[in-house]
Amino acid sequence: MNDIIRHLPAVIYEYTIHPDGTNRFTFISEASEAILGVTPEAVMKEASIMDSLIHEEDFATLAERSNESYKQEGELNWRGRMIIRGEERWMEVRSNHEIDEFGVTIRRGIIQDITERKSSGKESEIRYQGLVERLPMGIAIHIHGKLVFANAHAQLILGAQKSSDIIGTHVMNYIHPDYRENLLERVREVAAGAGVPAPMIEQKFIRVDGKVIDVEAMAFPFIFKGAPSVQVIFRDITERKITEARVKKNETLFSQLFQNIPMAVVMLDESGKVQQINKGFEAMFGYDVSELKGKNLNDTIVPDELRNEGVDLNNLITANQVVRLETIRKHKSGNVLSVILYGMPVVLGKQTIGIYGVYVDITDRKKVEEELKVRNTELDNFVYKVSHDLRAPLSSILGLVNLAKLPGNTDNPMDYIDIIGDKVEHLDHFIGDVLSHSKNLKMEVSISNVNFAQIIDRTFSELSYLEGANEIIRNIKIEGSDFYNDPWRISEILRNLISNSIKYRSFDSKTSEISIKIITDNVRTEISFADNGIGIDEASLNKIFEMFYRATEQSDGSGIGLYIVKNAVDKLGGQITVASKLGEGTRFNIILPNRIQSVVSKISSFVIEPR
C-alpha cells in the first residue's frame, strides 16, 4: 500500500481535530514534497505550515468550507489557489468526516494539483496519461463500470495483448465472483466519498486468459475527460501470496517440529538471551517462556559453579562452532539434572543471528551407569570372594582325601569324614546365601499377606542346627493390622538377622536374647530387631551392609547376610537403620510400606457388579 501511495499523483492525508481545540496531521504521503513543496515531516510537526500555503484571497473560502463541514459533520470539498515554491497553483482538497469514540474528528482525504485541468483539459489528459504509463503498477479508469482507460502495466497484469482487448469491457469481467458483491459496495462508497480513496484491500482478479491472480487495489473518484469516474490502482501480488503461503507453511512445519520434538529446545538471540522454548524444555526444567524470555540461561538453569562454562559455550557457538557436551543443569525446583547439551549457531551470511540449544536428559542413564559401576565392582569382589570361599573348603577336603590315601596312615577315617561334613555344610550355607542374593536381585516383588509369627517360628526352626541356637531366649511381640508385601524377601531379612544374632552371641553373657517387636498399621510396618550379642564397633557400622564385610572373626559366615538384608529392604521400598555398642548388642529398625491398598484395588478390579 505504501508503494502505491508513494507513486500516486496526489497527496493523501489524515487530519484530526480534538475536542480541546488542538489539531494535527497524523499522516501525509511523501507526494507532499513534490506537489506542495513541503516535507511530510514538516507538516506532521507543524500543521499551520499548510495554512501558510493558501492564497490569501482563497483562505476565507477554505475556512468557511472547513467550518461548515465540521458543523454539519459532512465531507469537505474545496478548490482554490496555493503558493507552491513561489508559483500559484490550483489545488483540489477533498476529505470525509468521521468522529471516533473519544470525540476526535478524523478527516481522511486527498489533495490534487488541478492547474493543468483548469487551463487545458486536453493538455492535462496528455500529461496524466504520460505520467501513469510510466508508473510500475496497474491504473485503470471506469465510468459506470465500463473501462475507459488502462495503462500498459494494467494490460500486462490483466493479460491483455493490447488496450482494445479490455477497453469498453465491464470491470466486473475481471473481478472474481467471490469479490463482486464487495466491489459493488466499494464503488458506492467511492461515489459517495467526496473524493476520498477507498482503502487498500487484497482481492482476486480474473485475467483475460481465465487465470486467477491475487491483487492489492485501491480506488478513488476521478474526473476523466470532464466526466465523473473511478480510478483504480492495483498491483499483482500473486507471487508474494505464494511466497507468503510457502513461508507460512515452513513456519508451521518448523513451529510444530520445534514444539513437539521429544527433547528440550531453547532458541537464543545473538547475545545469548532466551527468545523461545519448547514444551520439552518446560517439562525438563520447569520454566515457562514468560519466566525466561530476555534472560540469560546462566542466571537460571546453569549451576553457579558452571557459569564460566556457560559463557565459554556461548562464545564457541557464536564463533560458528557446533558444541556437544555432557554436563549438569538445574531444574526450577533446584534439583540437578545430568544432560547432553548440543549448541548450534544460526548463521545468516557470515553473521550469527541466533543459537539453538538442545538438551537430552540423561539423569536416569547416569544413575544406571553409576549403579552399574557399583555392581561391576561388587561383581569383581563377588567372583573373587566366591572363588576363594568355594576353593578353601574344597582344598581342605581334597587335602584330607589325599592324607587318607597316604601309605601307613593309621588315623580314624571317621574323623576325616566329620571334618569333610563340616566343610560341605559350610559350602552349602555359602551357596545358599549366594543363591538368595541372586534371587533377590532378579525376582519381581510379589505382594501377598505376610504372617510374621509363622515366618519367625519357621526361621528359628530352620536355624536350630546352628551352635547355640537352642540357648536363645526369644521375646516376640506382633501388633496391629494385616500386612501385605513380599513374604519371601521378609523371610530372608529375618533369617539373616536371626542367623547373625545366633552366630555373634556374647559368650560372656549369662543368657543370649533376641527381641523382635513388629507394629503394623494400614500404611506401614515397623520392625525393631535387637539382641544382646557382641555388638559392632563404631568404625564398622558404616560398612556392615557392604558385600562380604565381616566386622568380627567370631564366625566364619560368608559376610553377605546384611548385604542381602539391605538390598531386600530397598527392593521393598523400605528403610533400615542400625545402632550398636561393642559388648552390649545391636538393634536394627526397619520400616516397610504396607501394600494392602494395592491388593484391595486389584481385588476390586475383578468384582463384577450384579445386574
Image (cartoon, rainbow, N blue to C red):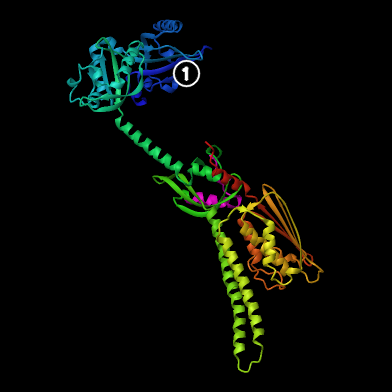
The span shown in magenta is 292-316
Which residue: 28% across, 21% down? 177
- Viewer-proximal residue, 35 or 382? 382
Q: Where is residue 319 in the image (x, y as percent from the top left)?
A: 46, 50
Residue indicated by mark 1: 46
Which residue: 58% across, 69% down? 382
Q: Where is residue 55 in the image (x, y as percent from the top left)?
A: 39, 9
Left or right placement of residue 551 versus residue 54 in this view: right
Left or right placement of residue 470 versus residue 387 in this view: right
Compared with 111, 158 (above or below) is: below
Q: Where is residue 452 in the image (x, y as percent from the top left)?
A: 68, 56
- Which element is circle 1 on? loop
Mark 1 burial class by Cα count in 10 Å: few <14, some 14-19, many 20+? few
- Viewer-proximal residue, 241 or 131? 241
Say what amino acid the circle numbered 1 marks. Glu
Left or right placement of residue 217 versus residue 357 in this view: left
Total labels: the figure holds: 1
- Viewer-proximal residue, 467 or 132? 467
Locate residue 566: give its quadrant: bottom right
Residue 89 visible in the shown view: no
Compared with 294, 396 (above or below) is: below
Left or right placement of residue 537 versus residue 124 in this view: right
Residue 309 in magenta stretch: yes
Locate residue 590: give its quadrant: bottom right
